[in-house]
Protein backbone atom coordinates (compact mmCIF):
# COMPACT_ATOMS: atom_id res chain seq x y z
CA UNK A 1 0.00 0.00 0.00
CA UNK A 2 1.08 3.57 -0.70
CA UNK A 3 0.61 6.19 2.02
CA UNK A 4 0.85 9.95 1.78
CA UNK A 5 0.20 12.98 3.99
CA UNK A 6 -1.38 16.11 2.55
CA UNK A 7 -1.56 19.31 4.57
CA UNK A 8 -3.53 22.34 3.35
CA UNK A 9 -3.36 26.12 3.76
CA UNK A 10 0.31 27.04 4.11
CA UNK A 11 0.42 30.71 3.09
CA UNK A 12 1.80 34.14 4.04
CA UNK A 13 -0.02 33.65 7.37
CA UNK A 14 1.92 30.49 8.32
CA UNK A 15 4.81 30.63 10.78
CA UNK A 16 7.62 28.13 10.07
CA UNK A 17 7.36 27.08 13.73
CA UNK A 18 3.79 25.88 13.17
CA UNK A 19 4.86 23.53 10.37
CA UNK A 20 7.92 22.41 12.30
CA UNK A 21 5.79 21.62 15.37
CA UNK A 22 3.33 19.68 13.22
CA UNK A 23 5.77 17.77 11.00
CA UNK A 24 9.36 18.20 12.16
CA UNK A 25 9.45 14.72 13.66
CA UNK A 26 7.03 13.13 11.18
CA UNK A 27 9.20 14.02 8.18
CA UNK A 28 11.99 11.72 9.32
CA UNK A 29 9.68 8.82 8.31
CA UNK A 30 8.32 10.22 5.05
CA UNK A 31 7.59 13.39 3.08
CA UNK A 32 4.65 15.72 3.73
CA UNK A 33 2.87 17.28 0.74
CA UNK A 34 1.92 20.89 1.47
CA UNK A 35 -0.91 22.56 -0.45
CA UNK A 36 0.33 26.16 -0.56
CA UNK A 37 -1.65 29.34 -1.34
CA UNK A 38 0.46 31.79 -3.40
CA UNK A 39 -1.50 35.04 -2.78
CA UNK A 40 -3.85 34.52 0.15
CA UNK A 41 -6.79 36.88 0.40
CA UNK A 42 -7.81 37.51 4.00
CA UNK A 43 -11.38 36.26 3.86
CA UNK A 44 -13.19 33.81 6.09
CA UNK A 45 -10.77 30.85 6.12
CA UNK A 46 -9.93 29.69 9.62
CA UNK A 47 -6.30 29.53 8.51
CA UNK A 48 -6.29 33.35 8.45
CA UNK A 49 -5.47 34.88 11.85
CA UNK A 50 -8.46 36.61 13.42
CA UNK A 51 -6.99 40.10 13.21
CA UNK A 52 -6.79 39.81 9.38
CA UNK A 53 -10.01 37.85 8.82
CA UNK A 54 -12.58 39.50 6.58
CA UNK A 55 -10.31 42.39 5.53
CA UNK A 56 -10.09 41.29 1.90
CA UNK A 57 -6.41 42.26 1.66
CA UNK A 58 -4.11 40.10 -0.49
CA UNK A 59 -0.88 38.68 1.00
CA UNK A 60 1.80 37.24 -1.32
CA UNK A 61 3.81 34.40 0.13
CA UNK A 62 7.19 36.08 -0.57
CA UNK A 63 6.42 38.72 2.06
CA UNK A 64 6.91 36.03 4.72
CA UNK A 65 10.64 35.62 4.23
CA UNK A 66 11.21 33.31 7.17
CA UNK A 67 8.64 30.88 5.81
CA UNK A 68 10.10 30.98 2.29
CA UNK A 69 13.59 30.19 3.63
CA UNK A 70 12.20 27.34 5.74
CA UNK A 71 10.24 25.85 2.80
CA UNK A 72 13.17 26.15 0.38
CA UNK A 73 15.44 24.23 2.76
CA UNK A 74 12.89 21.49 3.51
CA UNK A 75 11.96 21.06 -0.17
CA UNK A 76 15.60 20.74 -1.19
CA UNK A 77 15.98 17.94 1.37
CA UNK A 78 12.87 16.17 0.03
CA UNK A 79 11.00 16.59 3.32
CA UNK A 80 8.18 18.76 1.91
CA UNK A 81 6.52 18.58 -1.47
CA UNK A 82 4.77 21.77 -2.67
CA UNK A 83 1.34 21.58 -4.31
CA UNK A 84 -0.74 24.51 -5.61
CA UNK A 85 -3.73 25.34 -3.37
CA UNK A 86 -5.79 27.85 -5.33
CA UNK A 87 -4.53 31.38 -5.96
CA UNK A 88 -6.25 33.68 -3.43
CA UNK A 89 -8.04 30.80 -1.63
CA UNK A 90 -10.75 33.10 -0.22
CA UNK A 91 -13.21 34.77 -2.56
CA UNK A 92 -15.09 37.97 -1.61
CA UNK A 93 -18.35 36.16 -2.44
CA UNK A 94 -17.31 33.20 -0.27
CA UNK A 95 -17.84 30.72 -3.10
CA UNK A 96 -15.13 28.12 -3.73
CA UNK A 97 -12.41 29.83 -5.81
CA UNK A 98 -12.18 27.17 -8.54
CA UNK A 99 -15.86 26.29 -8.78
CA UNK A 100 -16.35 28.94 -11.51
CA UNK A 101 -14.73 32.06 -13.00
CA UNK A 102 -13.10 33.32 -16.17
CA UNK A 103 -9.45 33.59 -15.27
CA UNK A 104 -8.78 30.18 -13.75
CA UNK A 105 -6.19 29.16 -16.35
CA UNK A 106 -4.16 32.31 -15.68
CA UNK A 107 -4.44 31.78 -11.93
CA UNK A 108 -3.17 28.20 -12.17
CA UNK A 109 -0.31 29.02 -14.53
CA UNK A 110 0.80 32.18 -12.69
CA UNK A 111 0.34 30.70 -9.21
CA UNK A 112 2.35 27.62 -10.12
CA UNK A 113 5.21 29.57 -11.69
CA UNK A 114 5.32 31.99 -8.76
CA UNK A 115 5.63 29.17 -6.21
CA UNK A 116 8.09 27.18 -8.31
CA UNK A 117 10.40 30.18 -8.70
CA UNK A 118 10.04 31.31 -5.09
CA UNK A 119 10.54 27.94 -3.38
CA UNK A 120 12.63 26.12 -5.99
CA UNK A 121 10.09 23.31 -6.22
CA UNK A 122 8.48 21.55 -9.11
CA UNK A 123 4.70 21.42 -8.77
CA UNK A 124 2.72 18.46 -10.09
CA UNK A 125 -0.53 18.60 -8.12
CA UNK A 126 -3.41 21.06 -7.82
CA UNK A 127 -5.54 21.08 -4.66
CA UNK A 128 -8.62 23.29 -5.07
CA UNK A 129 -9.71 25.22 -1.96
CA UNK A 130 -12.52 23.35 -0.13
CA UNK A 131 -11.82 20.34 -2.38
CA UNK A 132 -14.22 21.97 -4.82
CA UNK A 133 -13.56 22.33 -8.53
CA UNK A 134 -15.86 23.08 -11.46
CA UNK A 135 -15.74 22.25 -15.15
CA UNK A 136 -13.64 25.31 -16.03
CA UNK A 137 -11.30 24.81 -13.10
CA UNK A 138 -10.66 21.21 -14.08
CA UNK A 139 -10.03 22.20 -17.70
CA UNK A 140 -7.57 24.88 -16.60
CA UNK A 141 -5.75 22.33 -14.43
CA UNK A 142 -5.53 19.80 -17.26
CA UNK A 143 -4.19 22.51 -19.57
CA UNK A 144 -1.41 23.16 -17.04
CA UNK A 145 -0.67 19.39 -17.00
CA UNK A 146 -1.29 19.03 -13.28
CA UNK A 147 -2.95 16.20 -11.39
CA UNK A 148 -5.82 16.68 -8.93
CA UNK A 149 -5.39 16.24 -5.16
CA UNK A 150 -9.04 15.23 -4.71
CA UNK A 151 -11.79 13.59 -6.78
CA UNK A 152 -13.81 15.76 -9.19
CA UNK A 153 -16.51 13.42 -10.50
CA UNK A 154 -19.06 13.98 -13.27
CA UNK A 155 -20.62 17.07 -11.72
CA UNK A 156 -17.24 18.77 -11.52
CA UNK A 157 -16.01 18.28 -15.02
CA UNK A 158 -15.27 14.67 -15.91
CA UNK A 159 -15.81 14.48 -19.64
CA UNK A 160 -18.77 12.26 -20.62
CA UNK A 161 -17.09 11.78 -24.02
CA UNK A 162 -13.98 10.12 -22.67
CA UNK A 163 -13.49 6.37 -22.50
CA UNK A 164 -11.29 6.79 -19.39
CA UNK A 165 -14.16 8.54 -17.59
CA UNK A 166 -16.57 5.68 -18.12
CA UNK A 167 -13.97 3.03 -17.25
CA UNK A 168 -13.27 4.89 -13.97
CA UNK A 169 -16.96 5.31 -13.25
CA UNK A 170 -17.59 1.58 -13.74
CA UNK A 171 -14.64 0.61 -11.54
CA UNK A 172 -15.91 2.93 -8.81
CA UNK A 173 -19.44 1.55 -9.06
CA UNK A 174 -18.12 -1.98 -8.78
CA UNK A 175 -16.00 -1.00 -5.78
CA UNK A 176 -18.92 0.71 -4.00
CA UNK A 177 -20.89 -2.53 -4.18
CA UNK A 178 -18.13 -4.19 -2.17
CA UNK A 179 -17.25 -1.34 0.18
CA UNK A 180 -19.08 1.95 0.61
CA UNK A 181 -16.17 3.77 2.26
CA UNK A 182 -13.19 5.34 0.58
CA UNK A 183 -11.62 5.13 -2.88
CA UNK A 184 -8.62 2.83 -2.63
CA UNK A 185 -6.68 3.67 -5.78
CA UNK A 186 -5.56 6.48 -8.08
CA UNK A 187 -8.16 7.42 -10.69
CA UNK A 188 -6.75 7.70 -14.21
CA UNK A 189 -8.94 10.01 -16.30
CA UNK A 190 -6.64 9.87 -19.34
CA UNK A 191 -5.52 13.53 -19.41
CA UNK A 192 -4.88 13.70 -15.62
CA UNK A 193 -5.03 11.59 -12.47
CA UNK A 194 -6.91 12.11 -9.21
CA UNK A 195 -6.26 10.95 -5.66
CA UNK A 196 -9.00 10.70 -3.04
CA UNK A 197 -8.34 12.52 0.22
CA UNK A 198 -9.25 10.97 3.55
CA UNK A 199 -9.98 14.07 5.66
CA UNK A 200 -8.70 14.31 9.21
CA UNK A 201 -10.65 17.19 10.76
CA UNK A 202 -12.81 17.61 13.88
CA UNK A 203 -15.74 16.20 11.85
CA UNK A 204 -13.92 13.04 10.70
CA UNK A 205 -14.68 9.68 12.24
CA UNK A 206 -11.61 7.93 13.58
CA UNK A 207 -13.38 4.59 13.32
CA UNK A 208 -14.23 5.01 9.65
CA UNK A 209 -10.72 6.24 8.77
CA UNK A 210 -9.34 3.18 10.52
CA UNK A 211 -11.64 0.96 8.49
CA UNK A 212 -10.66 2.69 5.24
CA UNK A 213 -6.97 2.36 6.12
CA UNK A 214 -7.34 -1.38 6.84
CA UNK A 215 -9.32 -1.95 3.65
CA UNK A 216 -6.79 -0.11 1.50
CA UNK A 217 -3.97 -2.03 3.14
CA UNK A 218 -5.74 -5.30 2.26
CA UNK A 219 -6.26 -4.37 -1.41
CA UNK A 220 -2.78 -2.78 -1.68
CA UNK A 221 -4.17 0.61 -2.72
CA UNK A 222 -3.34 4.22 -1.83
CA UNK A 223 -4.29 6.04 1.38
CA UNK A 224 -3.90 9.84 1.45
CA UNK A 225 -4.37 11.44 4.88
CA UNK A 226 -5.49 15.08 4.45
CA UNK A 227 -5.38 17.59 7.27
CA UNK A 228 -4.57 21.18 8.31
CA UNK A 229 -1.57 22.10 10.48
CA UNK A 230 -3.63 24.87 12.12
CA UNK A 231 -6.25 22.43 13.35
CA UNK A 232 -4.16 19.64 14.85
CA UNK A 233 -4.96 20.54 18.46
CA UNK A 234 -8.72 20.68 17.82
CA UNK A 235 -10.88 18.05 19.55
CA UNK A 236 -13.10 15.67 17.60
CA UNK A 237 -16.83 16.39 17.60
CA UNK A 238 -17.33 12.65 18.22
CA UNK A 239 -17.15 11.99 21.94
CA UNK A 240 -14.35 9.68 23.02
CA UNK A 241 -12.43 10.04 19.72
CA UNK A 242 -8.88 11.45 19.55
CA UNK A 243 -8.02 15.06 18.68
CA UNK A 244 -7.21 15.85 15.04
CA UNK A 245 -3.47 15.65 15.74
CA UNK A 246 -3.74 12.34 17.62
CA UNK A 247 -5.94 10.95 14.83
CA UNK A 248 -3.26 11.80 12.27
CA UNK A 249 -0.58 10.38 14.52
CA UNK A 250 -2.34 7.01 14.80
CA UNK A 251 -2.47 6.73 11.01
CA UNK A 252 1.19 7.70 10.72
CA UNK A 253 2.17 5.10 13.32
CA UNK A 254 0.29 2.35 11.47
CA UNK A 255 1.86 3.43 8.20
CA UNK A 256 5.41 3.58 9.44
CA UNK A 257 5.31 0.32 11.38
CA UNK A 258 3.79 -1.81 8.62
CA UNK A 259 6.42 -3.20 6.23
CA UNK A 260 3.79 -3.36 3.47
CA UNK A 261 3.37 0.42 3.49
CA UNK A 262 5.39 2.62 1.13
CA UNK A 263 5.32 6.30 2.15
CA UNK A 264 5.57 8.75 -0.75
CA UNK A 265 4.63 12.34 -1.60
CA UNK A 266 1.24 12.90 -3.25
CA UNK A 267 2.97 13.97 -6.48
CA UNK A 268 5.13 10.83 -6.57
CA UNK A 269 2.12 8.59 -6.10
CA UNK A 270 0.13 10.41 -8.80
CA UNK A 271 3.03 10.50 -11.27
CA UNK A 272 4.15 6.90 -10.86
CA UNK A 273 2.26 4.73 -13.29
CA UNK A 274 3.25 1.52 -11.50
CA UNK A 275 1.09 2.55 -8.53
CA UNK A 276 -2.19 1.53 -10.21
ZN1 LIG B 1 -7.67 25.41 2.07
Image (cartoon, grey):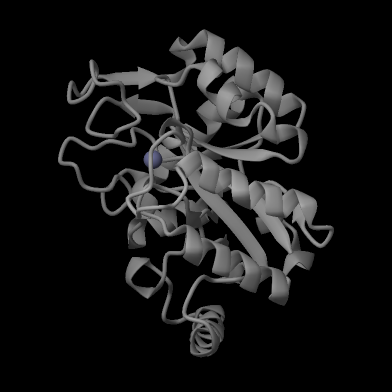
Residue in the foreground of this view, choosing between 182 and 93: 182
Residue in the foreground of this view, choosing between 83 and 34: 34
Q: Examine the rendered structure and indicate whether residue 32 appears above or below residue 13.
A: below
Q: Examine the rendered structure and indicate whether residue 54 appears above or below residue 62.
A: below
Q: Position of residue 112 (x, y in %)?
A: 52, 35
Taking the image as shown, residue 59 lies to the left or right of residue 43, namely right
Residue at the location (60% across, 43% down)? 249
Residue at the location (48% across, 17% down)? 15
Q: Residue most toward the right?
A: 259
Q: Position of residue 86 (x, y in %)?
A: 40, 40
- Ligand 1's quadrant: top left
Taking the image as shown, residue 215 lies to the left or right of residue 115, namely right
Task: Say which quadrant the N terminus sits in.
Answer: bottom right
Q: Position of residue 5 (x, y in %)?
A: 61, 46
Query: Would residue 191 be seen by someone viewing this image from the given angle?
Result: no
Q: Position of residue 264 (x, y in %)?
A: 73, 49
Q: Examine the rendered structure and indicate whether residue 58 appears above or below residue 193.
A: above
Q: Examine the rendered structure and indicate whether residue 12 appears above or below residue 251.
A: above
Q: Residue most toward the left?
A: 93
- Image quadrant where residue 152 sits: bottom left
Residue at the location (34% across, 62% down)? 135
Q: How many marks?
A: 0
Residue at the location (48% across, 74% down)? 181
Task: Say which quadrant the C terminus sits in.
Answer: bottom right
Taking the image as shown, residue 254 lies to the left or right of residue 168, namely right
Q: Residue most toward the front?
A: 240
Amino acid sequence: MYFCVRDDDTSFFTAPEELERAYGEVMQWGPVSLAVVPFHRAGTSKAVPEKFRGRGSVHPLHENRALVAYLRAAVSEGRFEIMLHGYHHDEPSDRAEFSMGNDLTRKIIDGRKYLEDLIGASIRVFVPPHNTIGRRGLRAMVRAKLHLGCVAGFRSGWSPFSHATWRTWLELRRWRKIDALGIPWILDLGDHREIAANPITPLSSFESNKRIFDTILRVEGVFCAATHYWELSAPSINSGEPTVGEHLRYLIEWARKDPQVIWRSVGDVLSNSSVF
